[in-house]
Amino acid sequence: MNFFQNTNPFNVNKNIKNKFFLNRIKFLTLHHYRNCSSYKKIIKNIKFNINRKNALKDFPMIPVRLFKKLDLKSVSSNKVVKKIVSSGTSGQNLSKIYLDKENASNQVKVLGKIMSSLLGKERIPMLIVDKNPAFFNKQIFNARLAAIYGFSIFGKNHCYLLNKKNEIDYRSLNIFLKKYGSKKFLIFGFTSMIFEYLLKKISVKRLKRKLENGILIHGGGWKKLEKIKISNAIFKNKLNNKIKLSRVHNYYGLVEQTGSIFVESNKCGYLHASAYSEIYIRDKNFNVLENRQKGLIQLLSLVPTSYPGHNILTEDIGEIIGVDNCKCGLRGKYFIVHGRAKEAEIRGCSDVR
């Protein structure tokens, strides 16, 4: 993936980004139209004219739940090298994402560009708030496992917080902190796992030192916290109070757009769109809303080529605050996610069978 290769993904002029994004989304829409029969049916059903001169906001989005109902792929089955399913309890209808070699490689490259802008290019010691992937069910490659593998390449000297029984391994943790805790190190985990193990279950008395030099990257798993009224601000405050962890970056993304995540600046607390992603907020009639208005989140990504995940209507509620003028200095749109829509209504293009 050569575009924006030598550029900080959070420092791209909006005019350059908009022009490139429009051309790329047009290309991807046509690519998936030609190579995915279900996607072609969607486009035909809504009578969208790809060849007409369209604004970026006018290109067709598909509801995220379609990935739970259909096998959406734009490559032949013999080209698929990895199938990822969304995280969830057994018995749930899970999203299925099909990756070929090129798409899988581009996910890693884009995630690498985004993460290096936060952490620098040098890999640092890493604490993973989960168990070793060797202990996972080998038959299921889900979003949680994909995230562990995806983010682990940005660290070294990996330490897994949990043992095979999902218990905190204090011995391994204290060895890690003794070796690397005096300098900058990376902490990664799903938000719900961070809350469960670094806030609820960890015993500070059993730690040889606090985690004040850690940089936490976490995402997903907010539904459990929303139920018990734990906001992002409360979450950060609790981490600081209990284990002295102050540098915390939430990220927002979907398994349907793995790699092109939106990351939170520690300085401003807002999520930011990189050069590889774009966001719109839609009302209940799918009209684009102005900044500082709440509505359904639409996400666009330059990455998906093996499946039509480039333009998705989520079931989350969000609000764009501004673009290119955030006090933290990062360019691009910056926004807030308010949580899951109480009754997500996906109409129109959902009837594709």
Image: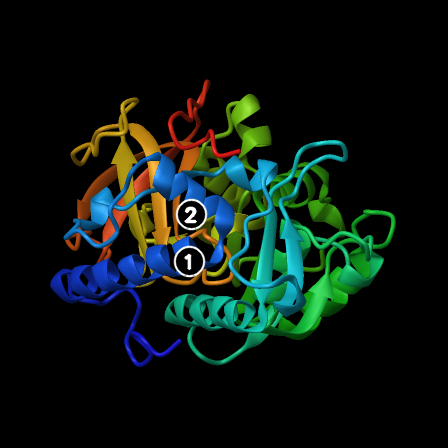
The numbered mark, 1 or 2, whose residue comes first in the sequence reads: 1
In this rendering, position of residue 334 left or right of residue 117: left
Q: Which residue is outermost to the right? A: 165
How many numbered discs sit on the rendered protein? 2
Q: Which mark is residue 40?
A: 2
Q: Which residue is outermost to the top? A: 343
Whole-angstrom CA distance, mark 1 to mark 2, is 7 Å
- Label 1 with label 2: CB-CB less than 8 Å: yes
Report if residue 310 is visible in the image.
Answer: yes
By what rule are the colours in the image chosen? rainbow
The residue pinned by badge 1 equals 34
| Viewer-closest of 253 and 199 | 253
Task: Check disc 1 and give the amino acid type.
Answer: Arg
Where does residue 22 sit, x and y in percent of width and height? 22, 58
The image quadrant that residue 322 belongs to is top left
Which image quarter is the N terminus in?
bottom left
